[in-house]
Amino acid sequence: MKPAPFDYCRPSTVTEALEALSSAESSRVLAGGQSLVPAMNFRLTDVSLLVDINRIEGLASVDCDPGGVTVGAAATQTQVLDHDGAASVVSGLRAALRHVGHLQIRNRGTVCGSLAHADPAAELPALAVASDAVIAVSGPDGERRIDAADFFIGAFWTALDDGELITEVRFPAEPPGSMTIVDEISRRAGDFAVAGLVATVEAEGGAVRGARLVGFGLGGVPTRLEAAEAAIRDWAPDHPADTLAEAVMADTADAFDDIHATSWYRREAVAALTVRAARRALAAEEAA
Amino acid sequence: MSLDIDSHIRHSTRHIGRSVPRREDRGPLTGRGRYVADIKIAGMLEVVFVRSVEAHARIVSIDTSEALAVEGVRAVFTAADLADVKTFPDYIPYIGPVRQRPLGTGTVRYVGTPYAAVVADDRYIAEDAAALVAAGTTYEPLPTVADLDQALAPGAPKLHDHWENNCSFDVAPHKPEVDRAFEQADHTFTETYVSQRQTGLPMETRGVVADITDGTLTVWSSTQSPHMVRSTVALMLGMPEPQVRVVHPTIGGGFGTKTHIYPEDIVVPWIARRLDRPARWIEDRMENLVASVHAREQRHEVEVAYDDDGTIRGVRCASMLDMGSGEIFMPGTAPVFVTNACITGGYDFPNMQARTIGVVTNKTPSGAYRGFGIPEGAFVMERIIDRVARLTGTDRVELRRRMLVRPGQTPYVMHGGGRLDSGSHTESFERGVEMAQPALERARARYAGDPDVRVGVGYSNYVEPTSPSYHLTTGHWGGGDAATVRVDPDGSVRVAAGLSAFGQGAETTAAQLAADALGVSPEEVTVVLGDTERAPYGLGSWGSRGAMMLTGSVLLASERLMDKARAIAAHMLEAAEADIVLTDGAFHVAGSDQPSVSWAEVGTAAWIRYVDLPDGMEPGLETSGYFHPENLQHQLDDTGKINAAASWSNGTHIGVVSVRVSTGEVRIEDYVVVHDCGTVINPALVEGQVHGGVAQGIAGAMYEHFQYDPDTANPRFASFMDYLVPTCAEVPHMEVDHFESPAPEQPLGVKGCGEGGTVGPPAVVAGAVSDALSEWGVDLTECPVTPVAVRAAIRSAEAAGTGADS
Amino acid sequence: MTISEPISEVDIEVSINGRTRRHRVPARLLLSDYIRDTVGLTGTHLGCEHGYCGACTVIVDGDAVRSCLMLAVQADGAEVRTVEDLAPAGSDCLSPMQQAFHDNHALQCGFCTAGFLMTLDSVDPAEWSEPERVVELLSGNLCRCTGYQNIVTAVTEAWSAYDGSGGSNDG
């Protein structure tokens, strides 16, 4: 399990990186490498040139302000997980990152790399969609900003064009009075989710006032649960769980089968996670 | 056997029975262990095997020219090059012969079959070239069989042309008393129970380094059985055995997978000879998942006859093993026989009629994995008992109590001839129930306020055959082992044994035994294992045999050595031999402490100062003992029964689980083990074996499952993302208690303990989850118990209207 | 240092266990193979080469990482520590964690042990000594022999001085 031969460069600026990316047929960006390198070890990915962006000045930054958190392309998941300021503005970051891999993976893996990799069972793409994150991209034709909702096209497939590079992602601050819950069913600690949910829930007076619900591990891309978002409005613990669960089932009809779970299981699980998230948010509100 | 280590020795400190710290630890702790991948020899070439990507195909052609053109590639070999190598022997007469060649030739029968070997300067280059060989291979695909039903269907594609069909063996005894039980019973039911495909998965993959110097071939192999590798390499390469030396360096776990002798064990030495260069192959994990044996894939079609009061009158069980392609040496047939031999566990249940069937499919060959068929049978029996309890309204604990082998009932002969020489079958269960009660109460209290959670408890009472015969498994080897003990001129002790060790602590154990047998401290004992040149012939470590084999062979050799040492000491002290005793490492005349002679003085006399020896005594102080356990049978008797194990350990596992109804998530809250392996030599090591075994059992109960595509027989797994080895977070805390029922016929009363831990968890988890979901009438019949399986069971109960409202 | 032009072999300088090493390595050489084969420190083991088992865990600039998921060239200029660096130099002593593993029978075959030790060595016990945190931390390393129980016991014993409320990492 050794990678096939490739060339390597380590640019010091984004411009240099873009030039390098355009210079070869199968060039790839190396940030954390925690998904790319295993794929290369399995010889599943054809790479002729690896462009290592880890020494580009300023790319490993995590900046936060009251309006949101900006994470640079080379910033590791551990950096963000340990960042108290980021957690206070976008609580979903810490909630999501707790489920990502293990310490050793998070120490190298990057937030932007996880978005670019677009694993359908990953937490961070779902968080990006749930929180209306904006992904900043540089390419041969200049810079552009892509809404997370438009960024994920399919499993391991994004709106990034050849020669483009994510430079940073901006997670807007959560709406006041809301909390983000990231919950999932995974077979083992640290595994990708069999099915998962990012729920940003606004609760007040013992009822859910509104929520953004995004499922993952269901299809090729994070799945916005729109019927459930409607059904959860004004939901309270004494309401029947069935209607909420049925709405989730309607939202997730396309969930896929694989060796870890069936489609119906994934749908049921996300329905259960949705009810659980609503209850948890209401309990938190009551406690606060 | 009357080995008595106390007859001539007085110890101020005994070491047997104490948790003597392991001498094996320091290397791995400091990074100075020496595993096979750590061996580096000047000029060593790297071998990579090219493996079939088709499950069943004829190889039409292999174009190696592009691979050979890669800089740094030294050679590419295919089956045609190995024509001078003999075929793996088919030693077992009653199974279909597979005539396995070291490299796939003509037809390949599973994804992962090695069919070419690339030799290059380093592994990276070898993999580059291997990819080119793969791309240059033309296959003619053949229809596949992916499971038992496909393999046994009329007109199914055959794996082995010279067979009638895909059935390797079918042994069907008939017991009239079981027929009578069915005639007389109040009720019957039928059920199918399934155990899934898994593997031992040592953290270190396999590996072979071979080098030929002055005509001697040295093979370093990560094997559990170096002497057997030597015999087989010598046979297949046509070399005299003394010219082949097999050494196992430090081994990173085996769990049965490394008992087999694989194609690579033959081909890498062949390459070293052919190129006259040291050669090395280290299996990578991607290969390991398809190229090291799988295990445990069995289906059990069961008929049960029972009475209204819960009495189980008789069981008929057809146990069917999915052998994969069957292309493995020694064959993977034996586990399903062990399943049937042990299926009744610790229960007094003679009315079992068990048929044993082996079937080949286009999957990785199945073989040995710690537990070796026992967990599959234990699962069936415990599920049957739970079912009967439920159908008759009998308490599950009470029913087991009624069925268990009682104190005083040993030696107890099981339905297939297995002879439970001693044990604590009832006592262990009672103790386990007592230990589990607080755990159950804790779990109920913990979830009392959560309407989504149910709590349940599951039970398993198993027996573990230890130090088995290897004849039924291999058709060739027996079941004994040898040790040599030597005292050098300086008085230090050297023990060499044919046993191997890969984490169990056998070196420490051997040192404890020799220390007590010779009245020295373990630190004064040097232990040599796993080297055919330095240790006598032995079969290695498997079958929970290490402790008993070491005890028997080391004590036998030590006793012989003591006889001679006492004669020398008596001569030096001018006393009668009968009056000589050994106290804390010095010989003296009983009743007087002065004068004395030390081991060094005796050793010096024996090897150097012959003037100190009694007249006519042959010099030297080295003795051997070949231990063959009493009551160990290698062949069936006239009634078709056999006691194929020297002694039988037993245990009880009880688990408390919580089940989340909405998601099917299962958590093991507490796990209780009561364990009895006779006299314990080193309690810490035994406990370690239990812990590790239980963790692997839980892996099988809930996580690990090799799945294949039913249409193509292609693996649906490629990595640890698909094959779910449990982490620390999945393995619960285990509370372990012990009984010690000595093996009455074995030295020191020692039994084996390596495998029992794996046996209980599938039955325990399925039983506990079914109990937790009893309001739905859930009765799980398959492993692994996954969230999907749990939800499926609840859904089908709800659909059938058998369950409660939720 | 910047490498502007694509190259297939790279000169690197890595500090390993306090000693500076300079090598020209193929760009594709994994850090794990660099440590084991080029430098010759074989205490770091390869258990899966796809970043799951943790056997190859080493410490790079203070962080535990999977060395099979890093290229050697990425460690250029970094400080790498391996299991060979844990025991006090020039003595027969073990580090407190190594000793706790030995005392609690927390290793059997020993193949995974280095990875566990490096993971443990990389963190501040004050932040990780709570029982649930210990389990979370250890869940990134697979062990097939011990069932983990004695490893948890060893860690708990070695870190018994830390109550999770802070404290120094000098012990």
Image (tube, coloured by chain):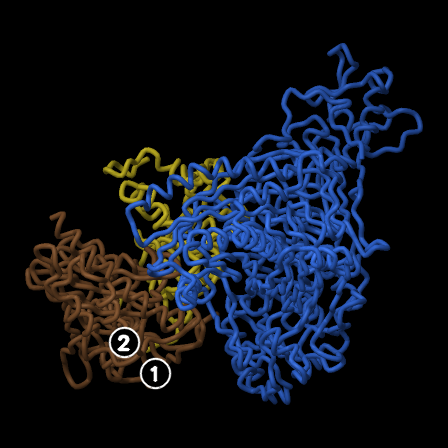
Chain colours: A brown, B blue, C yellow
The residue beneath circle 2 is A221
Q: Nearer the viewer, residue C128 or A168?
A: C128
Residue B655 drawn above or below residue A181: above
The residue beneath circle 1 is A26
Residue B395 on image: x %, y %: 52, 45
Residue sitting at x 37%, y 79%: A47
Is residue B567 visible in this depiction of the protein? yes
Element under label 1?
Answer: loop
Type of amino acid under label 2: Val
Residue B147 drawn above or below residue B702: below
Examine the image and state in which quarter residue B95 appears: bottom right
Residue B469 drawn above or below residue A90: above
Residue B370 on image: x %, y %: 60, 54
The chain holding disc 2 is: A
Residue sitting at x 58%, y 45%: B399
Q: Nearer the viewer, residue B468 or B182?
A: B182
